[in-house]
Image (cartoon, helix red, strand yellow):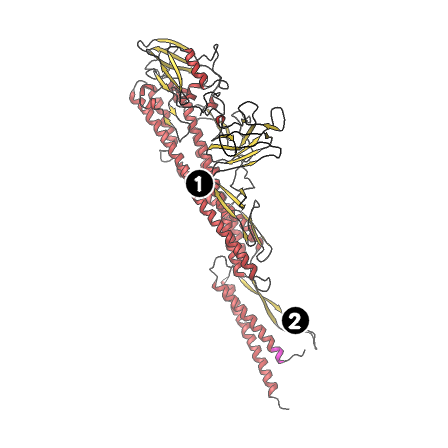
Amino acid sequence: MSFGANSILDMGRWALFASQVQLQVTGQNISNVNNEGYARRSVNLEEGPYIDYTPGQLGTGVKATSVARDFDEMVEMMYLEQASLKDKWGSLWEQLQGVESLFNEASGEGLSDALSQYFNSWNEVSQRPENYGARQTVVNDAATLVSTLKQIDDDLSLMQQRINSSIQDEVNDANQLMADIADLNNEIQIHHIEGQNNANTLLDERARKVRALGELLDIKTIDNGGGDFTVMTTAGQNLVDGATHFELEFNAATKTEDLRPASTFEGDIYYEGSDDFEYTIEFLASSSGSSTSGPVTTGTDSAQFRVSLDGGVTWLADEDGNEKHYYAREYDGRVNVEGLSIWFGSDTNSKGSTSGEFQEGDRYVISPHQGLYWVENTSHKEEITPQLHFNGEENSKRLTGGSLAALLSFRDSYVGKYREKLDNLAEGVIWETNRRCSQGAGLQTYTTTLGTYGVNDTGKALASDSTGLAFGDKLQSGSSFVYVYNESTGLLTSSAALDFGSGSTFDPNTHTLEDVRDAFNTTFPGMVTASIVNNKLQLEAEDGYSFAFGTDSSGLMAALGINTFFKGSSPDDMLVNEKVSSDLDYLMTGHVNGAGEMNAGDNTTALAMYDLREAEVTIYTVTEGTTNTTLLDYYNSLVGNVGTDTSRAQFNSSFYTTLANDLDERQQQVSGVNLDEEMSDLIKYQASYTAAAKLITTADQMLQTVLSLKP
């Protein structure tokens, strides 16, 4: 090969083309300086081949081989991790601020004030027990307390409903992003040729979509080049695999089963009720130690199971810390577990019969609320709703980041926890009030009364999990005193503790509502008649008699709603007993004294109610266990929880925002467009272009000189 003017001309031509490409790419960078997600482009130049020649090796110029995209994949992966946590805590902080304002006690109209005023009204009536104005104040302040509890609970419930709507919108957005990323992968696979035709615009668009998806849920990516690009959750569920994408679903309540191969059980699990927790039901070995748990029966040979509300990390226990076990029953014997009634039936009929036996380790999972599911195909879906274990750790097999995780966690782990504590506060107020009032007396005796709490089965022990009695777990063995009076003279006719046979007292693990009815009829024949109406106890005095209630060490009357102040067991159904609100004579301010007398000026029960303000009570929650505290302090701890959670979310939001911004800045240092740098490059490439053009002109002049030579 010879060198001469033609070689210099070719060299100038390639240099001119290279400078032209550099100028065009620089112009593209400048025009996209404000385009978010645009990664700076640069031109890769390659020196032409060398030719061995005399007097030495000579080059052939330069070639513009490709337009590259400046982008740091490692930094981007780190950014996605921190950004998902930033969006999670930022969204949580935003939502928790709304809850914090709901529990704001600064206005003087909060629940703490309503609770304090309720106790103070008992103090006022204790000073004037016979005064109807003071008695009416107790009822009015109780109604205010009830309405305040209901309002807060309703507001929290509305928050959960609103969150469900937001979750559905974000699930739709996530599904669209996954479909878009898969389409981009397909386009990139067609157009991208590494090192020759880089599909930079498509790669930028894909990176933008991935970032948007990472704001919704925690993800990680695997980039094998071109369209071979995978997006999955950090827990490992595939979201996008090349040109294939999967979907998320926000489904209604569901249940799943996981039975051992040796299990012979034929049937299904059923439930009623709703809850913010997910129920894991695991069957236990039989009492004999056999791996066979047993069948679904009405006897003690029935299979037993335990229940976890945090995915099997901890199991429900009683107030003493002992693990609670439940019998597997059919519909008529359904057991109450926290917020649900659970039973077993046939595959096609919830009230049908089952067959076979459970094995140790058989499991069911009940999700009694809407949950988020990853859908692999039409026959397989997996729940990925975030789950917080009671030890404070997150379930790493579920979502742990992004705004979707924040919304779901807010709905279940935060608002769900607050509502649980609010329920327990209401339950504590109801039970402790009724416990005292049921042993008190008003200004007149009863001729008839109907209990406010019923049972599912009148023939089951009242403390049984199957009885359905709201406060059945509060019952203790003990005696219940009743006093019968001559209605005309007001004189005591009979007084005794209920006789459950041969002088025995009440045993909640043995005696049923039918036994309580029979005990009344046995103890006070011809004076008080007990009957069961709509599964509730009704007492009626025979003509010429009336009755009142005294010391009740068992809590039986309070549990049945006899001679009580409140109805219901939660903010949703809590009410002042109509018997009291419609007739203030039945407000229990006093008691029946040792002589069997009821005195209008007696304030014994009123004082006991006022003392409740500072009395320690036992409150059990599945998330916090047993707490011994006053009702006011318990509510204050709830307010404190909200404040602490909000502060923690604010701190984490700030912390992860700083980390994410730092990583984004590092990425921008690589991929961002710097106008000063681009202007400098523009001048440089312009000079290169001019020099290349001059080189071509010089080569042309050389050729003209050669051609002009005459032989």
Coordinates of residue 630 in the picture (x, y in percent)? 44, 26
Secondary structure beneath label 2: loop
Ranked by sequence position, the earlier of labels 2 and 1 is: 2
Quadrant placement of the N terminus: bottom right
What stretch of residues is rendered in magenta? 4-8
Coordinates of residue 567 in the picture (x, y in percent)? 38, 25
Q: Is residue 121 positioned above or below 659 on the image?
A: above
Mark 1 and mark 2 in contact (Cβ < 8 Å)? no
In this view, the residue in front, 623 or 500, is 500
Q: What is the CA distance from the residue labelled 2 to the residue labelled 1?
A: 66 Å
Label 2 belongs to which residue? 49
Q: Is residue 655 magenta?
A: no
Amino acid at circle 2: Pro
Q: Is residue 654 left or right of residue 703?
A: left
Coordinates of residue 249 in the picture (x, y in percent)? 49, 45
Amino acid at circle 1: Leu
Q: Is residue 651 positioned above or below 77 on the image?
A: above
In this view, the residue in front, 299 or 579, is 299
Number of numbered discs overlaid on the protein picture: 2
> Which disc is residue 96 wearing?
1
Secondary structure beneath label 1: helix
Coordinates of residue 570 in the picture (x, y in percent)? 42, 29
In this view, the residue in front, 642 or 207, is 207
Magenta: main secondary structure = helix
